[in-house]
Amino acid sequence: MSRSTRAAGRRAAPRASRSRARSHRARTASKAIGLTLLSALVPGSGLLMGGRKKLGAFVLTISVGLLLIAAYVGLTQRDSVLALAVSPRQLLIATGAVVLLGGLWIWVVVASHKLIRPVSMTYTGRLAGSLFVGLLCFGIAVPTTVAAQTVMAQRDLVGSVFQSEGKSKSATRPKVTNASDPWAKTPRLNLLLLGADDGAGRTGVRTDTVIVASIDTKTGNTALISLSRNWMRMPFPEDSPLHKIYPDGFYDPNGPAEQPEYYLDSMYDNIPKAHPGVLGQTDNMGADVVKLAASAALGLDIDYYMQVNLAGFRQIIDALGGITVNVNYRVPIGGDYGEGPGSNSEKKPSGYIEPGPNQKLDGYHALWFARGRYGLSDPSRQERQRCTIHALVSSANPQALVTSYQQIAKAGKQLLRTDIPQEILPAFIQLALKVKSAKVTNIDLDKNKNFPTGQNPNYTAMREIIQKALTAQANPVASTVKPTKKPTSGTTKKPTPTKTTPTTPGTAENLNDACAYNPSQTGN
């Protein structure tokens, strides 16, 4: 073979290789852009079309496999997802996985476009292709970043609010013996809800809102029991050190008849100051004091507490987009009698929330709907607090949680304080899901007998009423009140007031009935 023939053969070989490479490329810039979009939607497809068949098949297989695994876990392994959502360590791993997958996705898109685009392109075509790939990468990077930030916000919230049993101290909570099924021997979980008011101009912390939620761990049916802020002589269990100090309840036997410094809402702040360390090691002695007193007063073993800071409560409601409530009478915004612990000087309300059905309230007005008391009775205030909780639970829909979760988590760090340990959070979340779809009722403690004065509430009678109501929940009675219908557009007809059947002591009243629109109520 001559030298010229061998040289011609060497020159011909590269041309064949380039020809085969060109066969995988798009003929036009617009088609390349379309195939690049397909490669972003179906990761791996662009690599296959660009001639990298083994790599493309591997990426495509991994992508489809991850989607199938995610669908399987989401549909059949809810417990595992819940466990991950409340485990700081697993949430950190999940954050790393999200960032890694996002980075690999972007690499696949860029690599696919390089393989697919024509070899010869005009400047305009190259610019258009580069801009489009940039937009695709941006479209992947933004949700990846948001997802990573959301997971980290959840981790921060869990780590800030919920401590592990070994790293936190409580004088009153039960010991965790079975984290996977903590309610195995607990037919009812009793949770103390505290609304703490430590606003500007007030001395110390007052628990103006004290509610016990008694939850059926099998069905999620929940009974709410409100305690009046001005009850006196709150008892303590006989085996508590505080019972020895206050054998006849929390009050001064040598003092006047009305003793604001011995109200229920003063216990949280005053007893720890007067008797520091009396309960032993605890991260929140005030909450433990109120738990013990509420347990003895109501005849219930209270397991855990959740303390709500009112400023954070307002932020939570704003993050959820507000709540919808029925306002049956004018509710004052602000106002102070100038009496009682931590009060300011007397002043009139700055405004009112006017009556009306299905009112959408933002955080500021929702807070005053729950708190307003100037000129109104304490029982009416307690009922509005229960209705606020009911509306808040109903408003926590998945769409609101997903779109506003970082705001909710940020507010939650300021909002919540609790002795619920991290170990049982998955079980708590499952129970909360049951509560959301179950029946929520209010137990009437016979306000005619127990609320004329807070000086000597009849705790024995209350305990009997509560036990009767909780026993009766096994045979629920259908609601007697139909929901209020919204007026149709174009009509001026006023909404028809709802007729309610009077609740007798010992009866659990459905909160749909108690919170219905009934303008005949006066709040007195």
Image (cartoon, grey):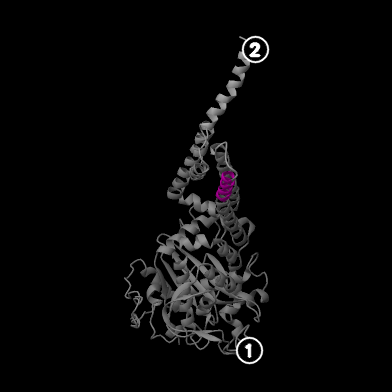
Q: CA distance from mark 2 to mark 1?
A: 110 Å
Numbered tag placed on residue 171 in the rendering: none
Compared to 428, does 25 lie above or below?
above
Residue drawn at x 67%, y 69% as measured from the top left: 277
Residues under numbered marks 2 and 1 in contact, where contact means CB atoms less than 8 Å apart: no
Span shown in magenta: 124-137
Query: Relative to 378, does residue 306 appear above or below in the rendering?
Result: above
- Work out which quarter of the rendered image holds the C terminus and state it: bottom left
Q: Quadrant of residue 286?
A: bottom right
Percent of width and height locating residue 70? 47, 46
Name above or below for residue 389 compared with residue 186.
Answer: below
**Residue nearest the viewer, comparing 485 with 445:** 485
Mark 2 Cα within 10 Å, few/some/many (few <14, many 20+)?
few
What secondary structure is marked by label 2?
helix
Q: Helix or strand or loop: what does disc 1 sit on? A: loop
Residue 336 in view of the camera = yes
Q: Position of residue 256 (x, y in %)?
A: 60, 90
- Residue 3, label in figure: 2
Label 1 packing within 10 angstroms: few (<14), some (14-19), many (20+)? few
Q: Quadrant of residue 502?
A: bottom left
N-terminal of the pair, mark 2 or mark 1, is 2
Q: Identify residue for label 1.
A: 345
Does residue 69 appear left or right of residue 270 in this picture? left
Say what amino acid the circle numbered 2 marks: Arg
